[in-house]
Image (tube, rainbow, N blue to C red):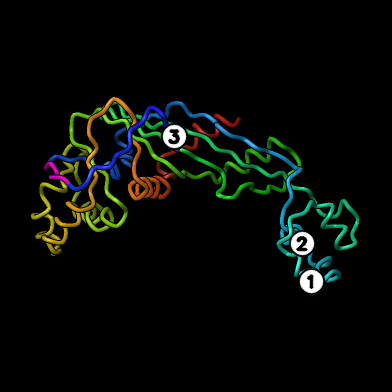
Amino acid sequence: MIAEDSTEVTYLSAPIPANTLWLNDLLIDASLKWQVHNCKITDETVTQDATLPFLYHYDTLSADLKAAHPLTPALLKRFNEPMSAAAAAQLLQLPSDTIPAPWQVKIIGTLVLFSESLQIAVRLRFTNSAKALEPVYVSDKAQAVTQAMQTWHFFSDVFVLNKCAKPIGVLPAEAYASTLNTESQARSQDVNEITVAGNVTEMASDLGTDTDSEATLLQETALLLPRDSQYQHLQPQYAVALLSELEAHKAELPELDKAIQARIA
């Protein structure tokens, strides 16, 4: 869902200024010292009452119990049937406390990454799981939340507030991989000198790539973000590219995990 204080970015290909900065690179540039603002939990479900498919319960059995209670054709037919741990134990004719009832956790939150030097803010969503609920086999509720959020990831919509004096662009994953990654392997540049579009001819010559193909790919796929006082909602192909870069470099951006862990503590 698009936030009320945002606009939908639908710009098509346009001339790319020579001094364009690419948000794909900027977000993972540790030298920019991105700040985490407004980290909050927007939806939290932690319960032991939700059901799970029978196969989840069966998998918790020890090897000895599985050997004593093999999967018959009748049980296999019910493998994906949702049920409680007690119901699964009854189905296997086991004591009701044989199968543990896990905590099931679903947490969704938002945070804003802000660069003071660039005057850019990026609003992101995070969650512990793509599933409706993630089972966690611990006895304590607080411990279940902590364990579930050890593997959080970004997902869904991305919004960008752009007040930068320089042109800001975003590339979809395929274009970013074939241009910016190639360039970064060939040369080291300061963030204020990232000018892929302007020096694409020189870059292609240096790297032995097809100049026309590189230029065409940038021209046809790059999204240029206008300066705007409102958040701009990125189309999915651009949002996915930014989220993929953030996920791949989370270990190098510890402030993200620190902010999220502080919020759930």
Amino acid bearing label 3: Glu
Using the rendered view, name the quadrant where residue 8 is placed: top left
Report whether 185 appears left or right of 81.
left
Report whether 214 appears left or right of 68.
left
Mark identifier at residue 58: 2
Which mark lies nearer to you, 1 or 3? 1
Q: Which residue is mark 1?
A: 71
Determine whether the residue tagged by mark 1 lies in a helix, strand or loop. Answer: loop
Q: Is disc 1 surrounded by few (<14), some (14 to 19) or many (20+) residues within 10 Å?
A: some
Rendered-image quadrant of the N terminus: top left
Q: Which residue is mark 3?
A: 255
Q: Is residue 15 magenta?
A: yes
Amino acid bearing label 1: Leu
Determine whether the residue tagged by mark 2 lies in a helix, strand or loop. Answer: helix
How far across and down, in percent of the image, does residue 233 sit? 35, 37
How far across and down, in percent of the image, does residue 24 sit? 30, 45
- Could you say which is closer to the camera, residue 148 or residue 87? 87
- Could you say which is closer to the camera, residue 15 or residue 38? 15
